[in-house]
Amino acid sequence: MSQLNTILNRFTSDKVNLRKSEKAKALEFWEPKVDNILRRIKRNDERFAKMETLFKGSYYERCKVGQPDEFDLTLVLENLELDDEPYGDTEDDGMGEPPKGFTRVMIDRGEEQIWRQDSCVNARGMLNASHLKSLFARLVSDAVAELGYGEFVEVSSNGPAVTLILTNNRNRRRYSIDLTPVIKDKSWPEDADEWKSRSSRAGWPNQSLVREICSDGCHLVPKPPKESSVPAHENEFLWRYSFSSGEKKLLLRGAHGEASSCRKQVLRILKVLNEELQLHPLKSYHLKTMLFYECEEHPNRSHWDSGRLGECFIGVLRRLEKCLKQRNCPHYFMREFNVFEVFPQQRCAELCGKIQDILRNPEADEFSSKIDERMSELNDILNRFTSIKKVTPSKSEKEKALEFWEPIVKDILKYVKERDIRFAGMEIQFKGSYYERCKVGEPDEFDLMLVIKTLELNGDPYDDTEDDGMSEPPTGFTTVMIDGDEVQIWRRNNCVNARGMLNAANVKSVFSDLVSGAVEELGHEGSVEVSTNGPAVTLLLTNNTNGLRYSIDLTPVIKDESWPEDADEWKSRSRRGWPNQSLVREICGDGCHLVPKLPKGSSVPAHENEFLWRYSFSSGEKKLLLKGAHGEASSCRKQVL
């Protein structure tokens, strides 16, 4: 198994893991456009006005593999939320018993009026899943057309979802976004009652998590059953139970927080194999189901230690082999429902054969060769790449860049300081790849961190005993309560609320307006463009003499002299000498910065979100890069980066 562990770990590194930069670029491209589409839908049809977005699927379960190019958004229609059963058993819907895993929805009297349009309800008030899905698909298409997105957004219907294919014309990357309209059912369905008290469960998931999942209910999605015995005119009224919220909790929290658990790694590897070996019609959901059953059978956390990766991988494959042989895979939450029932017998036999080939020799060349690299050859390639691709900018190019943009940016910042007393003591700190000596290609991007001295924190962001009137901030973020004297100068522009809480969004907005005003007053409009990007205000400067363009990020920040609790583990992390304890103490003693960047997909209410400041450890990162190599001239650390 040790050789298989090595193969699987290298396979994970080579084929499975997503690059953080690729994830960020993907979200930066598609999120604003999808947000605009959803806002337009809400405006165009009041029935979808209170639509809440939930982020589901592999990416948000942290199990996405390969490229970050597929995302699933569940859109909860809040005006259709069910507080109890979909409808009372005593009410007559005029239809037969729905098949396992499905239900129907009867809307309360009075509420059905707005849904009568487009035949979304029948005379008895039964909600037509098929018509509602068609209506939503039409609204999506209309929104894409109205926003002028037709050139780079394609719309199609796929199962219960409406799929958007967005093409980034700059790099030709394509992103698939599934939008699924659903109804929240706060009750737990009878079809899944057995899961609550499953006798075979001996510790996984724990009872606390089981209770939480059951009390949270499920969702209903507009997907009719395949090969159903239900008459066609009744089929379109069927809604399928979805337990995606529960599945997400099982994947994210079912490992009891063990950092060494290989559960998700096993699932990621299986998903890549599914794609590479073309094991259709198997989908991620089927593989996830196998993993859940294996977790139940082996509840002890020691079984899933990363050192037993190969054994766990083989265990899931054997379960998959058995289910394919029998053409029977019970739904994880509703065991009476066979998710393999629609698979052709012949295809199950073919898939079973492929799985058996892997099981016979999981360390075979056919498998391991996908990730086997000759290291000496790779070293040569990387050194040539460093030279050919101009990874290191020349000294003359760096000097020319600084000579052009530094005087202009200094004038802009001088204007900002003079115009607004709140930014008068602003201190410039140089951050980013250029100043870490890790910049690649042309020296055309620079990051300046601007420390607002009037807001420097000498201790914690604020006393825990003080009431800020807000909920607990998410990990990686904090709120800032400023002192009485400082409150007065920051009251303008709604930068603080009545409790003295500093509004990150408004501080960033004030700074952005000041920068734009400086560019205009100093007569730089012809050569300087101003935009906002995350926590930064970006200046795009064009040298009209040679046509070169330089991007300068200006980020207003608050210095926090303390080390945040969220990063306490880093102080005492068990290390083998890197970084050395002296450097660790120096970084922690220097504290961190707070930047005005809001969390994405946060559960924090919108009116509180704008008060959140994100922790930034860029000063510590710079020290690790510049001093962490202990001064070894031969170190390849920065070349690798």
Image (cartoon, grey):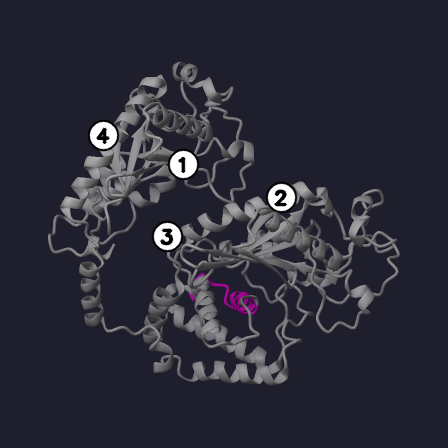
- Residue 384 % position (x, y): 18, 64
Near mark 2 (Cα within 10 A), the count class, few <14, some 14-19 or many ≥20, is some
Q: CA distance from mark 3 to mark 2?
A: 29 Å
Between marks 3 and 4 in the image, the one whose residue lies nearer the viewer: 4
Query: What residue appears at the point 57 percent right and 74 percent down from the top-left corner?
Result: 281
What is the number of the mark on residue 40? 2
Indicate which disc, 1 or 3, sits on the residue closer to the N terminus: 3
Considering depth in this image, is 285 or 255 the residue closer to the camera?
Answer: 285
Q: CA distance from mark 2 to mark 4?
A: 44 Å
Which quarter shows the C terminus? bottom left
10 sits left or right of 623 in the view? right
Q: Which residue is mark 4?
A: 407
Q: Which residue is mark 3?
A: 21
What is the number of the mark on residue 531? 1
Indicate which disc, 3 or 4, sits on the residue closer to the N terminus: 3
Q: Find numbered disc 2 in the image and state the secondary structure of the residue it sits on.
A: helix
392 sits left or right of 193 in the view? left
Q: Is residue 290 magenta?
A: yes
233 sits left or right of 531 in the view? right
Between marks 1 and 3 in the image, the one whose residue lies nearer the viewer: 1
Q: Are marks 1 and 3 in contact (CB under 8 Å)?
A: no
Indicate which disc, 2 or 1, sits on the residue closer to the N terminus: 2
Considering depth in this image, is 316 or 269 the residue closer to the camera?
Answer: 269
Q: Is residue 529 magenta?
A: no
| Range drawn in magenta | 286-303
Identity, as a three-letter code, of the amino acid under mark 1: Ser
Query: What residue appears at the point 55 percent right and 35 percent down from the top-left corner?
Result: 606
Q: Find numbered disc 3 in the image and state the secondary structure of the residue it sits on.
A: helix
Identity, as a three-letter code, of the amino acid under mark 2: Arg
Indicate which disc, 2 or 4, sits on the residue closer to the N terminus: 2
Which quarter shows the N terminus? bottom left
